[in-house]
Amino acid sequence: MKNNQPKNFEIECTTVWSFPRRGNWATHNAKYRGNWAPEIARNLILRYSKEGDLLLDPMVGGGTTAIECKLLNRNLIACDINDEALEITKNALQFECINSPIIEIFRNDARDLSFIEEESIDFILTHPPYANIIRYSDNIDGDLSQIKDLDKFCDEIEKIAKEFYRVLKREKYCAILIGDTRRNKLYQPLAYKVMERFLKVGFLLKEDIIKHQHNCKATGFWKKRSQEYNFLLIMHEHLFVFKKL
């Protein structure tokens, strides 16, 4: 039986992560717009959990976390508010593997995790929308990617952070990848606004990892726009790792 594991994988040891050629082992692919690289999920899972742990990704998107949990033998609760994302995740799990963890997939809003018991999760990792930078739907009630106002977006993220804090076990970790944006030609530190909300509900900051974005090319059209209108292209994201004491 195939194990579909990556070749020559090395765990990251610094606060700057860069994956010029994102992994395509097992059923990983970049077709789901905005999904995070499998190297990110794998690094996080290996560092902050162990085999048999129960993990949570409440905004699972294209299923990257679910694939890695199957490969690394972690149980997972995978949720999303978008039925299309859930179907993609289910299909992504259709590969042979020597492991057989329990991976449960639900349609659910991350702001309400009432079906999960208090302090029952060993590790949380997720990659939410960055407000409305990428819209994942036009008519799904509660879709965070429909929110344009950044403060309102952060208000909703705070609700999610409270639920994360409630369901996560003590002395365990929560990781979230989030990027910044520009509005009215000015830089908007969305990532740090989100970080503040997690700190507000009680989390402590374990790591702030800078993730290099390789899909943002400083050439051609955007290079010309950058020079013409005097702004720098955003080519990084923040991967925050929080701890619950």
Image: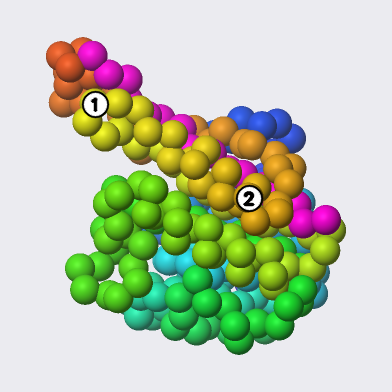
Distance from Cα at disc 1 to Cα at disc 2 = 29 Å
Q: Quadrant of the C terminus?
A: bottom right
Question: Residue visible at 64% across and 75% down?
Answer: 76
Q: Amino acid at mark 2?
A: Lys
Callout 1 secondary element:
loop
> Which residue is label 1 attached to?
185
Question: Residue visible at 21% across and 73% down?
Answer: 139
Which quadrant of the view contains residue 89?
Answer: bottom left
**As drawn, 155 above or below 101:** above
Callout 2 secondary element:
helix
Q: Residue 55: x, y in percent?
A: 68, 70
> Which residue is label 2 attached to?
200
Inspect the magenta stretch and tell me whether residue 243 lies in it. Answer: yes
Question: Which one is nearer the viewer's eye here, 116 or 8?
Answer: 116
Exactly how many numbered labels are in the figure? 2
Of tags 1 and 2, the one toward the viewer is 2
Question: Which one is nearer the viewer's eye here, 136 or 111?
Answer: 111
Q: Residue 105: x, y in percent?
A: 52, 82
Residue 176 in sight from this viewpoint: yes
Question: Residue visible at 61% across and 64% down?
Answer: 162
Give the residues in magenta: 230-245
Marker disc for residue 215? none
